[in-house]
Amino acid sequence: LPRQPAAPPLLALDIGGTLIKLVYTASCCGAGGAELRFAKFERRRLQECFQFIRAEGLLGCNGGTRASRENMTLKATGGGAYKFADDFREKLGVCLDKLDEMDSVVSGANFLLQNIPGAAFTHMNGQRHPINVSPNNLFPYLLVNIGSGVSILKVTGNRKFERVTGTHIGGGTMFGLAKLLTGCKSYDEFLQLSQKGDNFVLDLIVKDICGELVCQKQGLSTSTLASSFGKVITSKKKLTDYKPEDLASTLLSAFTYNIAQIAFLVASLLGLRRVFFGGSYIRGHKSTMENISYAIDFWISVSLGWQDLNICGLSSIRSQSQMQAVFLRHEGYLGALGALMSYGD
Ligand code: ADP
């Protein structure tokens, strides 16, 4: 970002259902420009967030005096920008300029995609490949923002979008259940547990229902998931008999496949080829991205057999026979980035 060397830092916030995300500028030594920095706090740790803002001098002049900040406004989005506006005024002496959340998420995604080389990439079969996007080939696309809940948007240009749908069964649901079932204390701990676990201890697969022989005869894939957590029903095991690792792995795959399937169906109905995934749910976690890509590919191949379905966009995905799941660097900060960009408005 080209900026005046003496300019005070810019700070924008996205205060969501689970996390507070901060994006702010910091001068780069000698370059006369500024770099973007990112920080996040659990929403229940608002006081720590205030301390961080003060300690980093993000209100300018090491915080300045209360009087000097009287007219200062910070760009903020997310539901918490409304809920905690009084706390920001009382504790930091600043006003929040509240921005629409979906506007901010789309601006943030478009900014990343059009200005940061290598910001978008695919992740499949253990390989990460950057994809080239330019304003000419970027639109339209589907943006699936997986936060506490999931928002699904059709983006047709800069500031041009429609929130198509969403689901309340998102990252908050998964992490909430994870805390109850595995006793994990943090999201990173949950992700680490899931890496060590085996979801087939709890998941029911097609082979478990039909037997291997029938599967082979009927050409069914033996390892296809039939019911997440489905094995628990016929088992005598109690919750404590299951390893937290296996529970974590089952939860992550159940939610990830489900969200990817919804994304596939919405993209199909709208005839959209590119699906970008954002939100802190992904957290740069390789298996999550792999599973989303795998699920999209799985449903593409299944949809090739849907010859008799005649629902608008479905025919177009059959003919285009390809849909791409694309991931973003800084995927959890789209709303906060968009809010930061709005200082230029
Ligand atoms: P929101 O704006 O609703 O807070 P986010 O995009 O920040 O949504 O995503 C929140 C979700 O991301 C959580 O529900 C959880 O699934 C996951 N997550 C990632 N990192 C963390 C973390 N450090 N603490 C809690 N949840 C996290």
Image (cartoon, helix red, strand yellow):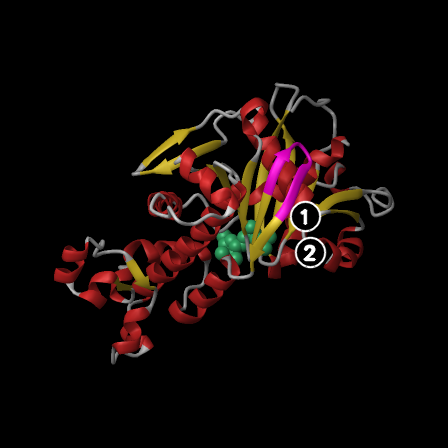
Magenta range is 154-163
Relative depth, front residue between 40 and 137: 137
- Who comes first in sequence, dot 2 or dot 1? 2
The amino acid type found where label 2 is placed reads Gly
Does residue 160 show up magenta in the picture? yes
User: Residue 174, percent across and down?
Assistant: 46, 62
Q: Residue at x 41, y 68 (%)?
A: 183
User: Residue 280, percent across and down?
Assistant: 52, 49
User: Residue 205, percent across and down?
Assistant: 26, 62
Dot 2 and dot 1 residues touching (CB under 8 Å)? yes
Residue at the disc numbered 2: 79
Q: Residue at x 45, y 63 (%)?
A: 185
Question: Quick one: SS at disc 1?
Answer: helix
Relative depth, front residue between 125 and 93: 125
Q: Quadrant of residue 335?
A: top right
Drawn side of residue 196 relative to residue 92, left or right? left
Q: Does the rendering let one see residue 22?
A: yes
Q: Residues within 10 Å of mark 1 (few under 14, many from 20)?
A: many
User: Residue 5, percent across and down?
Assistant: 71, 22
Q: Residues within 10 Å of mark 2 (few under 14, many from 20)?
A: some
Q: Is mark 2 within 8 Å of ligand 1?
A: no
Q: Which mark is residue 101?
A: 1
